[in-house]
């Protein structure tokens, strides 16, 4: 199937294929890293080396890759990093003890607890034990509360990264109709709050939303954070809309890959070579309808790590300036600033 965008020309009106502008997350990440390097150099000159401690419990292969990438980013930027690897049998009490030590350490500015934690561990208790001043993932209830009330805080990395993509790509947010599909604590909810603080009119959708395609079709900004491969279909998207695809799904089933990537030979070739391929929550055909879209991979993912780095630098600065992440405004442009 092909999807076309109507383009008006001065004398005739015709339908031609206009592919969406690709919002390149890697390029935006590089821009942010260049800014961070300058800020880190200033902190170093003042005798401060911001540092991140990562807690990786057990042997989850995907988590190991995510944490490795985060530590590599610290090394690339010259940040301190510590990797703590309690075994999969660690108890909530043992993890609380470890978090307590990291909270106490003056060298550690940011604490990252890689999720998911093993089932036996009380995840909410662990996340709430992180010192809010070191909560670089933005998952602490106090961080979420500050975000709700529009105060400057350590904002969850993935939604903060989506805002960077929108802002740095010049997508108008104020007054825009934005639809966020997904309402998780780590993506959907903070995403909706950030868009609201930036003066978008926000609709939050979830698994019980009625007539989801119709709701999505109203949006000029669509954020897909669902965890369902290629769910947002081309005919759900308003022509010209900006689509931010947060989803990362690995397809290993040949029939599913053939169905989703029927018109994307490069992805099918990748699947045949490697036996798997990544797809977002947005169908590839949406790129033929949207005005701008993030790719998967190479869209939101690089920004999530960039925001973690930025939060670590921000936490280091705020902890020295105020002893904690101080209140302020997250509305408008201020929300984009470290
Ligand atoms: P969750 O599973 O926590 O939340 C998914 C949300 O999608 C829920 O609110 C759920 O609704 C909603 N949903 C599920 N099915 C439907 C449906 N059929 N129709 C409408 N809504 C639906 O996922 P996360 O928020 O943690 O992650 C979302 C995606 O983003 C995943 O693919 C994940 O891998 C990816 N991700 C990517 C990151 C990155 O760096 N790029 C970082 C974090 C996540 P309900 O609440 O009703 O159950």
Image (cartoon, rainbow, N blue to C red):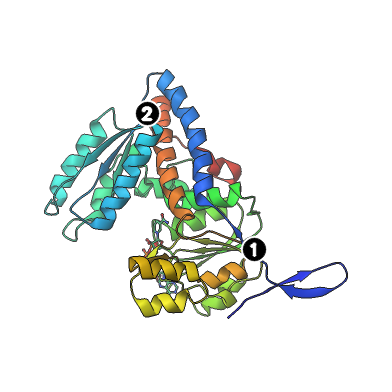
Location of residue 194 in the rendering, given as x and y in whole percent from the top left corner: 52, 52
The label shown at residue 61 is: none
Q: Residue at x 43, y 78 (%)?
A: 258
**Disc 2/disc 1 C-alpha distance (Å):** 44 Å
Location of residue 305 in the rendering, given as x and y in whole percent from the top left corner: 41, 46
Q: Residue at x 63, y 65 (%)?
A: 19
Q: Quadrant of the N terminus?
A: bottom right
Q: In which quadrant of this rendering is ligand 1 seen?
A: bottom left
Q: How many labels, in total?
A: 2
Residue at the limit of the structure toward the top, as seen here: 46
* Dot 1 beta carbon under 8 Å from ligand 1: no
Marks 2/1 in contact by CB < 8 Å: the verdict is no
**Label 1 secondary element:** loop
**Where is residue 18, by image quadrant?**
bottom right
User: Relative to residue 76, is residue 249 depicted above or below?
Assistant: below
Location of residue 193 in the rendering, given as x and y in whole percent from the top left corner: 50, 54
Q: Residue at x 47, y 31 (%)?
A: 37
The residue identified by callout 2 is 323
User: Relative to residue 147, is residue 16 depicted above or below?
Assistant: below
């Amino acid at each position: 199937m092909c999807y076309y965008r109507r383009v008006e020309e001065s004398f005739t009106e015709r339908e031609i294929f206009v592919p969406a502008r690709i919002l390149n997350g890697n390029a935006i990440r590089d821009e942010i890293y260049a800014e961070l390097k300058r800020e880190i150099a200033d902190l170093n000159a003042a005798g401060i080396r911001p540092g991140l401690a990562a807690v990786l419990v057990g042997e989850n292969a995907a988590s190991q890759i995510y944490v490795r990438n985060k530590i590599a980013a610290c090394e690339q930027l010259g940040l301190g990093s510590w990797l703590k690897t309690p075994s999969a049998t660690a108890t909530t009490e043992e993890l609380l003890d470890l978090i307590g030590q990291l909270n106490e350490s003056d060298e550690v500015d940011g604490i990252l607890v890689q999720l998911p934690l093993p089932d036996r561990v009380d995840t909410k208790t662990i996340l709430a034990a992180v010192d809010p001043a070191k909560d670089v993932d933005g998952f602490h209830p106090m961080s979420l509360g500050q975000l709700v009330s529009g105060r400057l805080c350590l904002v969850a990395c993935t939604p903060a990264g989506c805002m960077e993509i929108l802002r740095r790509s010049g997508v108008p947010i104020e007054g825009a109709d934005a639809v966020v599909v997904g309402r998780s604590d780590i993506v959907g909810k903070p995403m909706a709050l950030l868009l609201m603080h930036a003066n978008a009119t926000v609709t939050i959708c979830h698994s019980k939303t009625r007539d989801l395609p119709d709701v999505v079709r109203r949006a000029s900004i669509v954020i897909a954070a669902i965890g369902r491969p290629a769910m947002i279909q081309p005919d759900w998207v308003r022509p010209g809309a900006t689509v931010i695809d947060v989803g990362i799904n690995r397809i290993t089933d040949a029939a599913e890959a053939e169905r989703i990537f029927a018109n994307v030979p490069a992805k099918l070739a990748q699947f045949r070579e490697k036996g798997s391929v990544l797809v977002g929550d947005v169908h590839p055909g949406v790129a033929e309808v949207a005005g701008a879209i993030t790719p998967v991979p190479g869209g939101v993912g690089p920004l999530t790590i960039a925001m973690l780095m930025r939060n670590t630098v921000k936490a280091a600065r705020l902890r020295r300036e105020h002893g904690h992440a101080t209140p302020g405004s997250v509305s408008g442009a201020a929300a984009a600033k470290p």
